[in-house]
Amino acid sequence: MYSKTFDFYDRTSLKSYNLDESMRYQLNTLDKLDVFTRKHCENVAALTCRLCEKLHLNKGFTEYCTICAYLHDLGKQFIPPEILQKPSKLTDEEYEIMKTHTTLGYNLCMEDLKLRPYATGALNHHEALNGTGYPNGLTKKDIPYEAQIIRVADEYDAIVSKRQYKSHIGISDTLKILIENANNGKNNPKIVKKLIKVVIEDTEYEIYLTQSYINELEQEIKRFNQMDKYKIAMNNAIKEKDKNYYLEGLKILLKNNETLENYSSICEEYKKAYNTRKAIIDNLYNEIKIIKKLKV
């Protein structure tokens, strides 16, 4: 059901790249950003890497795109915090200031020889195929492919982060927005299709992990149920040797910090966790059904 994908940010992957000093310099540039923008950049870069894989792009271009994505919001370090971190909708004037992060990031990259090759990501990640994007209103033929990929990854993470999804439940609503932007000519439909595949993989993996945890909880609850049977048998036993037999059975089944006095309350916590995860996995199965029916 789940196949591991290439993750640029995985330590093993980073080692496989044998990053030189220049590349490490590029990846450390985000230290200047606030924690929220940095996290967003890391998310967008990781997703860009996954999309490149789905698009069957070669390793060199995937690496290039990923670093472009990692640096795409560098210009936001120059945006006033009261605008950058404003929780409510920006005014028209504030939005115009926010939009300048593209050219600010581009200029910053162009001034640094080590960042210059990746300036296009900063400049063009808000351009739309139909010419309605910014800063230059480019159309499809003029927008670099890496920027088209980053735009989809950026839009997805921005919406997901804003809605504060704790899991993939409800994520289909985000995908519908990106599909709409593909249908109206803003996003590259091929890239959005690959995004759907990535989300399906991630949702299936979340189902796998959740089900694995549920299986563990089931085994623990069975153990507690067996303990209850021993306890009842012990309390009903008349002979002392029988009472001791069931008592020893109870003790054998105890784990970690469990005692004969607290195991019942611990069992209740396990049951609550089980019911919570069951509800989550049911919702995830419903969500993935919706996602698999989405069409670009």
Image (tube, rainbow, N blue to C red):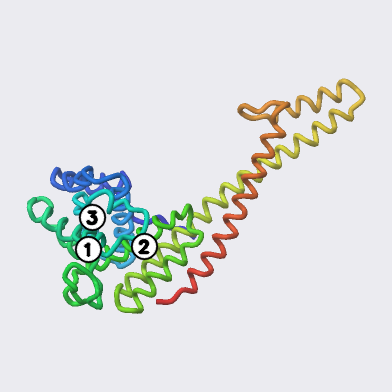
**Label number found at residue 96:** 1
- Determine crowd level at label 1: few under 14, some 14-19, many 20+ residues with C-alpha closer than 10 A: few
Q: Give, as a three-letter code, the residue at label 3.
A: Asp
Rendered location of residue 79, percent (x, y) = 21, 52
**Outermost residue to the top:** 240
Q: CA distance from mark 1 to mark 2?
A: 21 Å
**Camera-nearest residue between 91 and 290:** 91
- Determine crowd level at label 3: few under 14, some 14-19, many 20+ residues with C-alpha closer than 10 A: many
Q: Give, as a three-letter code, the residue at label 1.
A: Glu
Q: Is residue 18 in view from this perspective?
A: no
Rendered location of residue 78, percent (x, y) = 18, 50
Q: Is residue 75 in view from this perspective?
A: yes
Is 138 above or below relative to 35?
below
Image point (22%, 63%), residue name: 96
**Camera-nearest residue between 140 and 134:** 134
Which residue was labeled with disc 2?
156
**Outermost residue to the right:** 238
Image point (33%, 59%), residue name: 50
Earlier sequence position, callout 1 versus callout 3: 3
Say which quarter of the image contains residue 127: bottom left
**Label number found at residue 73:** 3
Earlier sequence position, callout 3 versus callout 2: 3
Rendered location of residue 267, percent (x, y) = 68, 38
| Quadrant containing the C terminus in the rendered view | bottom left
Rendered location of residue 223, percent (x, y) = 70, 38
Image point (57%, 56%), residue name: 281
